[in-house]
Image (tube, grey):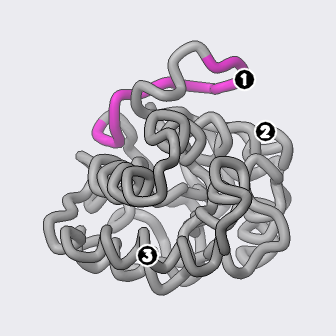
Amino acid sequence: MHCAALLFDNDGVLVDSTALIEAAIRDWAAWRQVDADEAVRLSHGRRFTELIPEVAPHLDAAAERIWILDREATTRPLLQPIPGARELTAALPADRWAIVTSAHTPTATDRLHHAGITLPRHLVGGEQLSNGKPDPEGYLKAAALLGFDPADCVVVEDAPAGVGAALAAGMRCVGIGPQVAGLAGLVARLPDLTPITVTGESWGLRLVC
């Protein structure tokens, strides 16, 4: 597969943060007497400021987001990279990849730091966007920052909301992990990043899954 650039989600794609984030959401749900299973189900690939109004519309979403992040931060040093993440990102030319995440930029960069992954030149955080995933705004912004047509970009995602955003942006999408099982429109489904190899060429990237 050929492409101009690779665009990654962060949590669940580069950083193995799912369990830590889910634990923080469950602690918050227990404190606020919110349905924890429903909150976790709706959380994947989405911004807390969009999740909280759905499950607890009577609460201040911005304030509740800070509580969840503070809870999650206590275990953030335990974060690990998704298998293959360090090797794949290290092999990519700096002008050929970016991250698009629902987390705010400081949170995302901190998670990447603890997982030992080098920061990209371009990271589109949730606070930079008017609309979160599954809206395509984030991926379209990343393609524009890199200077490439959306159709020439490949996205790597692990959540239905993120896959929806990639496809709505007119990009090809590789899905990893169990949440993408059965989703239509993916060019490949993988357990993690280890099967992906990439070679930089003068015209772009040669991607093998």
The residue pinned by badge 1 equals 185
Q: Residue 172, located in which quarter of the rendered image?
A: top right
Q: Earlier in the sequence, mark 2 or mark 3?
A: 3
Which amino acid does the dot numbered 3 rest on?
Answer: Trp
Q: Quadrant of the C terminus?
A: top left
Q: Are marks 1 and 2 in contact (CB under 8 Å)?
A: yes
Reply above or below: 84 against 75.
above
- Mark 1: few/some/many CA within 10 Å (<14, 14-19, 20+): few
- Front residue of this view, candidates 46 and 123: 46
What secondary structure characterizes most of the magenta part? loop
Q: Residue 118, located in which quarter of the rendered image?
A: bottom left
Q: Earlier in the sequence, mark 3 or mark 1?
A: 3
- The part of the chain drawn in magenta is 183-194
Q: Does residue 157 appear anywhere in the picture?
A: yes
- Front residue of this view, candidates 8 and 56: 56
- Mark 2: few/some/many CA within 10 Å (<14, 14-19, 20+): many
Residue 33, which numbered label?
A: none
In the rendered image, residue 142, in percent from the top left (x then y), is placed at 72, 69
What whole-number distance in Å separates the C-alpha atoms at marks 3 and 1? Answer: 36 Å
Reply above or below: 1 against 7.
above
Residue 167, which numbered label?
A: 2
Residue at horizontal 54 percent and vertical 72 percent from the top: 64
Residue 67, which numbered label?
A: 3
Secondary structure beneath disc 3?
helix
Secondary structure beneath disc 1?
loop
In the rendered image, residue 74, in percent from the top left (x then y), is placed at 21, 75
